[in-house]
């Protein structure tokens, strides 16, 4: 039970820091968008921002998955 508690705590803390990092990046990217886009850009620019961030997230996720597969990290799930 002690090991399960530590594993769960590790997962929760790692997830919490991941969320904090995501929020920090969101703030940084939002500030960057507001700096370089016109103030009245509106809803279309928000959707463009969402699409760009989504595409970036997919690209990074796929790149990390390929890197993990190369070093054999995906074999640990089997």
Image (cartoon, rainbow, N blue to C red):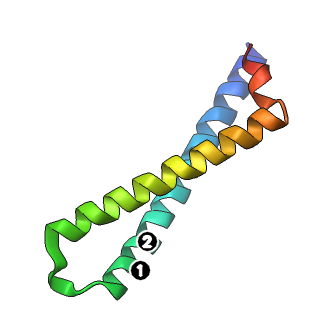
User: Do the residues bearing badges 1 and 2 touch, measured as CB atoms within 8 Å?
Assistant: yes
Give residue 57's position: percent from left, percent from top. Answer: 50, 51
Residue in the image at 41% along x and 52% along y: 54
42 with respect to 50 (left or right): left
Mark 2: few, some, or many residues within 10 Å (few <14, many ≥20)?
Answer: some
Q: Which residue is mark 2?
A: 29
Q: Position of residue 19 (x, y in %)?
A: 51, 50
Q: Does 65 sit left or right of 53 as displayed?
A: right
Corner quadrant of residue 72 = top right
* Image quarter of the N terminus: top right
How many angstroms separate mark 1 from mark 2 (CA)?
Answer: 5 Å
> Does the rendering let one see residue 5?
yes
Looking at the rendered structure, the secondary structure element under dot 1 is helix
Q: What residue do we see at 59% from left, 36% from top?
A: 12
SS type, badge 2: helix
Image quadrant occupied by the C terminus: top right
Name above or below for residue 6 compared with residue 18: above
Q: Which residue is mark 1?
A: 32
How many numbered circles does the render carry? 2
Left or right, 38 with respect to 55, comes to left
Residue located at (55% from left, 58% from top): 21
Give the residue displayed 18% in from the left and 67% down from the top. Answer: 44
**Residue 19 seen in this snapshot:** no
Query: Could you tell me residue 56's position as x and y percent?
Result: 49, 57
């Amino acid at each position: 039970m002690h090991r399960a508690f530590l594993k769960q705590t590790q997962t929760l803390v790692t997830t919490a820091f991941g969320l904090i990092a995501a929020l920090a990046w969101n703030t940084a990217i939002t500030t960057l968008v507001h700096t370089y886009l016109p103030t009245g850009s509106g809803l279309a620019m928000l959707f463009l921002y969402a699409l760009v961030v989504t595409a970036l997230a997919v690209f990074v996720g796929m790149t990390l998955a390929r890197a993990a597969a190369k070093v054999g990290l995906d074999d640990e799930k089997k």
